[in-house]
Image: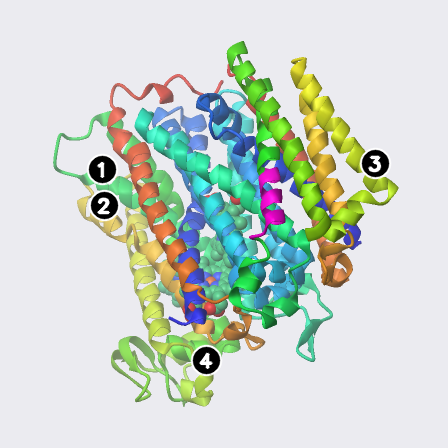
Amino acid sequence: MTNLLAARAQMAVSLAFHIIFAEVGIALPLMMTIAEWRWLRTGDGAYLDLAKRWAKGTAILFAVGAVSGTVLSFELGLLWPGFMRYAGAIIGMPFSLEGFAFFTEAIFLGVYLYGWDRIPARAHLASGALVAVSGALSGIFVVIANAWMNAPAGFRLVGGQPVDVNPLAAMANPAALSQTIHMTIAAYASTALAVAGIHAYVLRRRRGAPLTEELARFHRAALAVSLSIGIPAAIVQPISGDLSARFVAERQPVKLAAMEAQFQSVRGAPLRIGGWPNVAKEETRYSIEIPRGLSFLAFHDPNALVNGLMAFPREEWPPVRVVHASFELMLALGSAMAIVSLWAGWVAIRRRRLRYEAADRWLLAALVVTGPFGFLATEAGWLVTEVGRQPWIVYGVMKTKDAVTPMPGLIVPFSLVTLLYCGLGVVVIWLLWRQIVSTSGEFGGQRSKEFIGTGVSE
Amino acid sequence: MSLNIYALSAGADFGGGVWDLLASGPRRERQRELIAKAIAPIWEANHVWLILVIVLLFTAFPSAFALLMTQLHIPMTLMLIGIVLRGSAFTFRSYDSRRDSVQRRWGRVFAIASTATPVLLGCIVGAIATGSISTAAVTSASFVDVYVRSWLEPFPIGVGLLAFLLFAFLAAVYLTLEARDDAMREDFRTRALAAGAAVAVVASIDLALARSSAPLVWSALTEGTLATALRIGAVLASLGAMAALWRRSFRQARIAAILEVSLIVWGWALGQFPYLVPPEITVENAAAPTATLRLVVIALVVGLAVLLPSLRYLFKVFKANPG
Ligand code: HDD
Ligand code: HEM
Ligand code: HEM
């Protein structure tokens, strides 16, 4: 493994790990706030349980999100000093703002967790909402930094050095809008559908004794809250994906060609579903082609010209197979999530209320299946964005190989970090399972003491 | 302008330091519960100071950041692993089962990581002060010369030790105030006294080492009235802290201890000024373009205007009694 490859792999592992916690950190606080609000409105204890459990989950995941994020901010310098020397002054701004947003999030999470019976109900609810808002803001700020790497703006190049730096213009780069929208919705869709999947699983399970009424109420409430976010997010996501795709088509034609495994430049290019690109032969086989589909989707004109990979020098091609396969995967998962969400939404509309029963066996089964899809789609989407940008670290401005640290033997930190994350991942899953899922048996009749009698003062 | 930022980020650094101490001291303690209770609500906020410092550093002084991260790759990576283990072990311990053996295992990870992290941090600071970190070094010498020698030397290690002891000292002083019964308070008092004495010894040794290893810091610390005043102030504060501990005036001890640590941090900063990473990188030549700095200052001011009241609110909530 070359040094450059080790550095990229380490960055990729760290980000792929962090993004899961980031997504949960964005969406779970919103869900917990909604649950608390429902509790205040209806007085239904199931919602209070939910809010408390989700708050606990948020706390654990927030801590892991925080440490893995710290790792990332060091790694930007440890692995890519060339990039930071160059870009620090230009895109440090969103990272600094992100720092402040995190700080606010951490403070109000503290207030939320420790304030249940210490502050008025309304103030408590408001602090939950602040956690949700600052979580979303922090995600938006980092993604703006990433968008800048795709569409650098806010400076001029003179003799290879950036001058006339304008950090605000850098933040307002052309990729920022589509990317932040797509990412934020992705966080809501992934987390909400994953949570819905877990509760759907428990609600429909056959083995063992049937759920007590109280337990069933709890899981129904969880489904209602999570789907109230998951359904709209998953339905809107393909539309926002279209916005992202049109940005890529306009600004990063090589990436588009790699995403679609389009080697030839043609008018009225087809949309490919599946297929395996053969880079040596410069062709893509085994795919289903929808005539003129790509031209239509990317440019909203069925006869538009799509530049294929061959229109660009070979050394500027990203790894085509990874990009194409990841893109196809994201589309497939996204479509499945949208279809299941439409189904769940339709059931709710017919019933005129957001309520699902154990008897909705097929719908619940579908929700269980789509549970992990959002996180998978997120990883796939980031692979498209990051690998598709190669060989550039800052698109059109700086090559990745010029940014990497001269420090030799990077395989060592890469292995350490990977091991560390594998360990952390196992522990987190185990903890969440014990804390949140497996104790849900304690609800019926004798709810755990912790959850009883700690109601917010009326 | 850049001076301004320097002062502010040093301030944040110091704040981060103080909180971290609180979280780092506890190692050998049996009174885990008290410590856990004292740390739990502030751990997150605490950790964020560190992140803010890093982020502000790379925004305001990108070239210094890049150079440090290159040559100090090894201690930085180790420190990073320490931070990860510490943070996650602490959280897991608070949320995991109450069974003793599990608790103890997390506790041990927490303790070891808490010890290693400040030592490494000190090594890094010490390495910077020796002036052996420069762009010229990257291209010229062998692996060991570039990536190892700068921080694995007596002086940086001495500074690491000093940082560690300072953290321990402060944490013990804090905990004397948090303790609810006398036996425990006495425990922490003894520890604070021991750590305080060790600080004095190690600080003197480091100063002696600085003369040959970090001439820049040495001369700045010994010459000039401001430096002398700071140095005398630090010594007085430490004597004051020890005396107050002796007399069991724990509140005064805490104030004196905070003063002592801040004076040391400020003395150090002054000692290096105007260098960020001697001998090459100064505050002037590493600073980001003015447009960036101006925005960073605005962000800092607005950010602090939001954060400080929120932080006060958090403490108020936490100190309030349930019910
Ligand atoms: C829940 C997750 C999820 C789902 C269901 C989708 N995406 Fe996505 N997609 C992401 C999560 C994501 C992401 C991980 O969040 C990315 C990576 C970078 C970014 O901004 O968003 C992304 C990137 C991304 C990009 C690349 C943007 C760039 O490189 O700048 C395109 C073109 C699309 N998406 C298009 C789509 C389409 C047409 C979808 C329709 C089904 C879709 N995505 C569903
Ligand atoms: C907003 C935040 C992000 C920033 C600032 C960022 C930055 C970077 C940088 C500096 C690199 C190394 C240079 C390069 O290979 O181009 C990189 C690579 C990479 N990142 Fe990101 N990234 C972000 C988000 C993500 C996320 C969330 C993922 C999730 C999976 C991800 C996946 C990757 C991968 C797979 C690579 C390696 C690319 C390759 O090997 O071809 N990135 N990123
Ligand atoms: C190079 C890329 C990135 C860096 C340097 C980075 C940095 C950080 C840091 C330092 C933290 C911890 C802050 C704290 O203690 O609260 C953090 C947490 C977080 N990050 Fe990232 N991050 C990166 C990528 C991303 C991406 C792509 C997103 C997503 C959209 C994201 C969203 C978040 C969120 C929401 C948190 C809060 C933690 C939580 O609530 O679980 N980050 N990040």
Residue to which mark 2 is pinned: A364
**Residue A134 appears in the rendering:** no
Question: Residue flagged by tag 1: what amino acid is it?
Answer: Leu
In this rendering, would A194 be left or right of B248? left
Q: Is ligand 3 closer than 8 angstroms to the Cβ of mark 3?
A: no
Q: Position of residue B181 (x, y in %)?
A: 52, 11
A392 inside magenta stretch: no
Residue to which mark 4 is pinned: A254
Residue to which mark 3 is pinned: B229
Task: Have a look at marks 4 and 2 and say if they share a chain.
Answer: yes
SS for dot 1 = helix
Mark 3 or 2, closer to the camera? 3
Residue to which mark 1 is pinned: A203
What is the spatial separation of the Cα atoms under label 3 and label 2, in whole angstroms?
72 Å
Task: Have a look at marks 1 and 2 and say if they share a chain.
Answer: yes
What is the spatial separation of the Cα atoms under label 4 and label 2, in whole angstroms?
41 Å
Task: Have a look at marks 4 and 3 and say if they share a chain.
Answer: no
Q: Is ligand 1 closer than 8 angstroms to the Cβ of mark 4?
A: no
* Numbered marks: total: 4
What is the spatial separation of the Cα atoms under label 3 and label 1, in whole angstroms?
70 Å
What is the spatial separation of the Cα atoms under label 1 and label 2, in whole angstroms?
8 Å
What is the spatial separation of the Cα atoms under label 4 and label 3, in whole angstroms?
63 Å
Q: Which residues are magenta?
A: B152-163
Question: Residue flagged by tag 2: what amino acid is it?
Answer: Leu
Confirm or deny contact between disc 1 and disc 2 (CB under 8 A): yes
B159 inside magenta stretch: yes
Q: In the image shown, does B175 or B163 lie closer to the viewer?
A: B163
In this rendering, would B40 be left or right of A234? right
Confirm or deny contact between disc 4 and disc 3 (CB under 8 A): no
